[in-house]
Amino acid sequence: MRIPPFHLSGALVALALLSAPLAATAQEKYDGFLCCNMRSDGSWISDSNYSENGKRVIPVGTPVSVTGYGRHRVNVRIDGARQAIGNDYSRDIALADFARRYVVNEDPAAKIAGYPAKIQEAIKRAKITTGMTREQVLMALGYPISSENPDLGANLWRYWMSSFAEFQVQFDANGRVSGVTTDPNTRNLVWAD
């Protein structure tokens, strides 16, 4: 059976209308909280979360307003200042989903308050320690970039403190941190004893 051309164009219009709400979700503006400790130069927060000179850590749980979207970025307001969270290395994630990773609805402070003191202190210092869960590592260090870590259930996550300072977080069979592999200087920056 052949479909007349006018029916086909009507089907395409209907399909476009159905997909419009999905495209609109990337423009969603909302208030929330920073999922994790993130480093900023004052205007830009990269998903690489490098620890470079001049950057300060914005603590997990900081109130954040998503104000709009740009090319590979989520525009936010933090403490009254405009910033952008850049999707520099996780571009396989849709921008709306990327925004929801970093700006969450529930304040993580309530969960953190229930953790053992050693874990709380490590998260506060943007470090990791033995026994942390994946969620606790995310709060302390941010998300590992998806281009290098496509499976968050993997037993190894790769992070970088800078372009040349990689460290790898190992998880045991129970999903808890069992160690970190890196050079001694980077280890001092990321590991809490």
Image: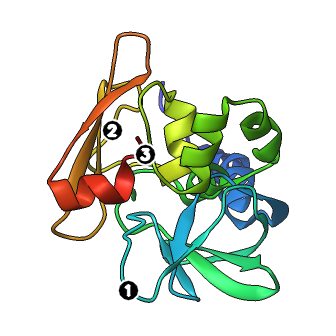
Decide: few, some or many residues near mark 2? Use Cα within 10 Å; few <14, some 14-19, many ≥20. Answer: few
Check disc 2 and report its element: helix, strand or loop: loop
Q: Which dot marks residue 192?
A: 3
In which quadrant of the rendered image does the C terminus lie?
top left
The amino acid marked with disc number 3 is Ala
Q: Is residue 145 visible?
A: no
Front residue (pair 62, 131): 131
Mark 1 vs 3, N-terminal side: 1
- Which disc, if any, is residue 53? 1
Judge left or right: residue 27 versus residue 29: left
Residue linked to disc 2: 150
Q: Hey, which quadrant is residue 80 in on the image?
A: bottom right
Give how far across and how far down residue 44 sits, in percent. Answer: 52, 82
Residue at screen point 34% across, 62% down = 89
In the visual, does 77 lie left or right of 40?
right
Q: Nearer the viewer, residue 46 or 170?
A: 170
User: Which residue corresponds to the image point at 72% horizontal and 67% vertical from the top-left?
Assistant: 27
| Of pointers 1 and 2, the one earlier in the residue sequence | 1
Q: CA distance from mark 1 to mark 2?
A: 29 Å
Helix, strand or loop for disc 1: loop
For residue 23, what is the image quadrant? Answer: bottom right
Q: Position of residue 41 (x, y in %)?
A: 51, 86
| Outermost residue, top side | 173
